[in-house]
Image (tube, coloured by chain):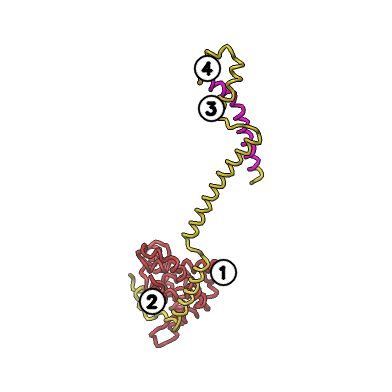
Amino acid sequence: MKLDELYDRYGEKLYHYLTVKLASAEDAEDILQEVFLRLARYSIRWKFIKNEEPYVFRVARNEANRFLKRKHQNQINPENAPALARVINDSLVTDCPDPSDKESLSLALARLPEEQREVIVLRFFEELTLKEIAAVCGLSLNTVASRYRYGLSKLKSLLEAKDD
Amino acid sequence: MTDPEKEMESYLSRFRRKVPPPGFKEQLLGRVEERRKLEQAITPPRWKIAVACLALIVIFLGANFFINRTEERYLSAFLDINQATESGIVEEALPSFLADVPELADLEKSPQIFKRRIREKAEPRKQKIEEYLNLLNMKEEYNGS
């Protein structure tokens, strides 16, 4: 598959996913470049891959994890939630007339545990199914489903707490 | 699925990811293409590496065989030892053996008896060469060469 075609299918989704995962649009751009370079090197494997999308996301996830490991930062520090919230806020658009809705959601997402945030971002903004998310994260479907449920419930409580 | 989950899902569906700035795709793919070209220029194709490795292995094995043969010849010449072939030993040792045992000259001219007796005589010489070669190998291993 050509890189151009690959970008049209997954480029924007990967960029958004990496931006949230790395809490930085600049780092996301660098890592996306690495991901595409890796995918170009693996071009010979394409004919053996059944589910393209989880594969591409998995390559991106591994690359992002390697980057975070190099930076000795496996997870986003909870104290950096406001900074992450700003990055998430910049990466989203909404039809809501009230811009504070987007800010509240971004802050709530930033305060979620990393593993729950990842599932929710992949499910809602990158439009992956729970089964695909399980393949991307190398987890069982049950684990992903429970992270999704707990994530939604925590997100709801965080949003309600903000409203109060 | 519970109602609060549905409620959250409908809330989240109002948000979408932002599209990257214009020119992002071209810039990204351009840089990837540049790096790919650089990589291809630096890294030779795998088949070239495989052929080079194979050639090196063949050269090494050939050289090893040649060195061993030359060393053996050199040692034989150095120690004044002829190659201990059976026919060579029989021809070399037959007259002296017959002189040692004249009474058996007629009776025991059977080649099998000669060969066995002479092999017994030649055995210590062969062992001596082998021991010397073993010693040489041990020395080489010890020196790490």
Q: Chain of mark 1?
A: A
Task: Report which colour depicts chain B.
Answer: yellow
The image quarter containing residue B1 is bottom left
Q: SS at mark 2?
A: helix
Q: Nearer the viewer, residue A76 or A13?
A: A13
Q: Which residues are magenta?
A: B113-140
The total number of labels drawn is 4
Q: Which mark is residue A8?
A: 2
The residue lying furthest to the top in this view is B103
Q: Which mark is residue A31?
A: none
Residue type marked 2: Asp
Q: Nearer the viewer, residue A58 or A121?
A: A58
Label 2 vs label 4: CA separation? 95 Å
What percent of the width, then of the height, locates residue B10?
A: 35, 78
Residue type marked 3: Ser
User: Residue sitting at 55 percent across and 74 percent down?
Assistant: A79
State yes or no: residue B76 in magenta: no
Residue type marked 4: Lys
Say whether mark 4 and mark 3 are on the same chain: yes
Q: Which residue is mark 3?
A: B87
Label 1 vs label 4: CA separation? 89 Å
